Amino acid sequence: MSNYQIQGRVIHVGETEEIGEKKFRKRVVVVETGADTDWPQQVPVEFVQANVDRLDAVTVGSMIEIEFDIRGREWKGKYYVNLAGWKVRLLAVEQRAPAAEPPAPHGYVDFGKADDADDGIPF
């Protein structure tokens, strides 16, 4: 099986889930790639069993590189794919103070609040 790599900024680190009687462990990290493009992608990568612990040092805002395998399967006539992570490398940890307001979504334009001074716009 081939291995692949992805680099990007962490936008979500999930909690470790334990599934079933055998306590199968799973954890998801979501990496945003292409943030400086018109179409950034938010890519979830799953880590399972012993690999779950590799995400302990990963925090939202960090730049990371993940090595993963592509897994595919059929279930009830439908096909599914997931990215199975097995190695994480921290490239940079975000060291900024928390913002007073969350950043605006990509492509969002703030036209001001309704109670702003009259600017001549009829709505």
Image: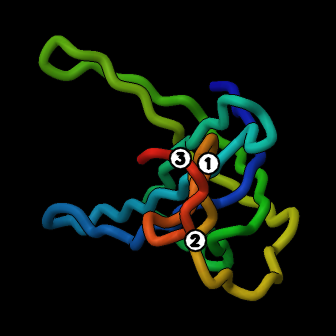
- Rendered image coloring scheme: rainbow
Percent of width and height locating residue 92: 86, 68
For label 3, count other residues whose C-alpha is less than 10 Å away and answer few (under 14), some (14-19) or many (20+): few
> In the rendered image, which quarter is residue 56 located in?
bottom right
Q: Is residue 108 left or right of residue 47?
A: right
Secondary structure beneath disc 3? loop
| Mark 1 nearby-residue class (10 Å; few <14, some 14–19, many ≥20) | few
Mark 1–mark 3 Cα distance, whole angstroms, equals: 16 Å
Question: Residue 82: x percent and y percent?
Answer: 45, 34
Identify the residue under disc 1: 109
Q: Earlier in the sequence, mark 1 or mark 3?
A: 1
Vertical placement of residue 34 versus 77, above or below: below
Q: In the image, what residue occupies the spot 41% across and 24% down? A: 72
Q: Which mark is residue 102?
A: 2
- Secondary structure under tag 2 reads loop
Q: Are marks 1 and 2 in contact (CB under 8 Å)?
A: no
